[in-house]
Structures are given as C-alpha cells and as structure tokens.
Amino acid sequence: MQIKRTTSFERKLKKFAKKHFPIQLLKPCIAAITEQDSNILKKIKDHALQGNWQGYREFYPARYGSYGKRYDNWIIIYRIDHNEMMLVLIATSSHELLD
C-alpha cells in the first residue's frame, strides 16, 4: 500500500515534533492499519467518520504507547483509496475540527 501525506499534514507534523509529541508512534500505527492488525486497531481506536467526513477514518496514535492523557486528543485522519493511504489531517483537539 502506498502512503501519501498532504502538505498540510507535513507542516503540522513538524510543529507537533517540536512540541515533543510522540510522532514515532505513527509508523507502527500505520503498519497496523495496512496489515489490518485488529488488536492494535482496537487499541488506537481506529474508526470510520460520519457526516461531512464520511469516507475518512481516524485513530489516536498516543494510545499505542503509554503517554497518558496529555496526548489523548491527538488524532490522525486518513482515507484509503485504491490501495493508497492518504494521511490528511493531524489535530490535537477533541473533535472540533470535524464539525
């Protein structure tokens, strides 16, 4: 599966790295998605979105590690089209970006 990142995603990821977010957790989370590892998918709460975001999915990468509540609202939004995973958005707020 090919993985692409939007320009916005790249910019935000750099900001989060500077703020010491555990961005190293993205790699195992993305691997779990591509391999459909149900145990990890449950742990990171991977799920489909609804409404305006129908067709997209989200997960919580900090739940893969043991980082407590500090990063609990950090979400990654993505979609998969024709064997291509597109990482679209990165956020640190509950779900207000999805409204």
Image (spheres, rainbow, N blue to C red):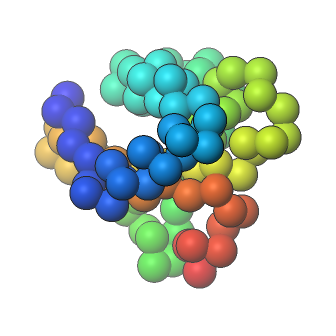
Residue 79 visible? The answer is no
Position of residue 34 in the picture relative to residue 47 (left or right): left
Q: Nearer the viewer, residue 71 or 42?
A: 71
Q: Residue 17 placed where, x, y %?
A: 51, 38
Vertical order, 51 against 89 (above or below) = below
Q: Does residue 39 appear in the picture of this structure?
A: yes
Which residue appears at 65% of the width and 24% of the height? 64
Q: Is residue 3 above or below residue 94?
A: above
Position above or below: 53 against 32 = below
Q: Quadrant of the C terminus?
A: bottom right
Residues 20 and 77: in front is 20
Q: Quadrant of residue 92?
A: bottom right
Q: Quadrant of the N terminus?
A: top left
Place of residue 54 in the rendered image (x, y in percent of width and height, measured from the top left): 43, 68
Camera-nearest residue between 96 and 55: 96
Specify the quadrant of the image occupied by residue 7.
Answer: bottom left
Residue at coordinates 51% horizontally, 77% vertically from top-left? 51
Count every numbered label the image shows and give the total: 0
Residue 87: where, in percent of width, then height?
34, 48
